[in-house]
Image (cartoon, rainbow, N blue to C red):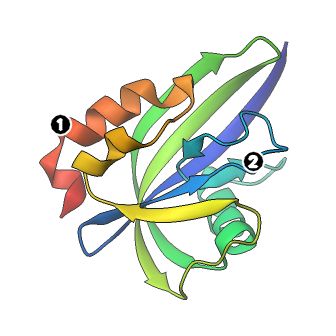
Amino acid sequence: MKRVEVAAGLVFRNGLLLITQRRPEDHLGGLWEFPGGKREPNETYEECLHRELREELDIEVEVNELVESISHDYPDKSVHLKFFRCDWRKDEPRKIHVHDFAWVNRTELSNYEFPAADAHLLTTLRERNDLWV
């Protein structure tokens, strides 16, 4: 089974979290996720995250601590995701390689449908106050 390594950002600004919606034509199209993408060979997860957030949304962030590392098997591939807490630094998000985006608070997360791989992280986000400051 194909294994994909992904870096994803939990991008916070003023107590809100940035989420993005996958393009309809993409794998798991229409679902919401945390912005990021596939790690290139010889690229650190942090470097990947900087590159992906610039390519997808045209924003700059400060990458902080690793919050969660998850492996999940889909029928066609296995993904290994590393989620980093990030602080938004500059440039307003633009829909470059995403269908949509939203800044949400903790209670609003349940209004969006996420991939199965994000289930444990969503629980963590709802329970950990320290991530939202």
The residue pinned by badge 1 equals 127
Q: In the depicted view, which residue is nearer to us: 52 or 32?
A: 32
Q: State the residue position of label 2.
A: 39
In the shown orientation, is residue 6 left or right of residue 86?
Answer: right
Q: Quadrant of residue 115?
A: top right
Location of the C terminus by quadrant is bottom left
Left-right relation of 77 to 133: right
In the rendered image, residue 25, in percent from the top left (x then y), is placed at 85, 44
Disc 1 is placed on an element classified as helix
Label 1 to label 2: alpha-carbon separation: 28 Å
* Residue drawn 66% across the image and 79% down it: 58
Does 128 appear above or below 120?
below
Q: Name the residue at 55% across, 45% down.
A: 33
- Where does the N terminus fall, quadrant-wise? top right
* Dot 2 alpha-carbon crowd within 10 angstroms: few under 14, some 14 to 19, many 20 or more: many
- Which residue sits at x=75%, y=72%? 96
Above or below for 19 versus 62? above
Residue 38 picture location, percent across and down: 75, 46
Whether residue 57 sits left or right of residue 93 in the image: it is right
Q: Position of residue 113 (x, y in %)?
A: 49, 36
The residue under label 1 is which amino acid type? Glu
Residue at point 45%, 83% (across, down): 89
Q: Amino acid at mark 2?
A: Arg
SS at circle 2: loop
Q: Earlier in the sequence, mark 1 or mark 2?
A: 2
Q: What is the number of the mark on residue 102? A: none
Pick the residue in front: 48 or 106.
106
Q: How many marks?
A: 2
Q: Is residue 90 above or below residue 107?
A: below
Instruction: Provide residue 102's location: percent of width, then percent of height.
Output: 47, 64
Relative to 24, residue 115 above or below: above
Query: Mark 1 or mark 2: which is in front?
Result: 1
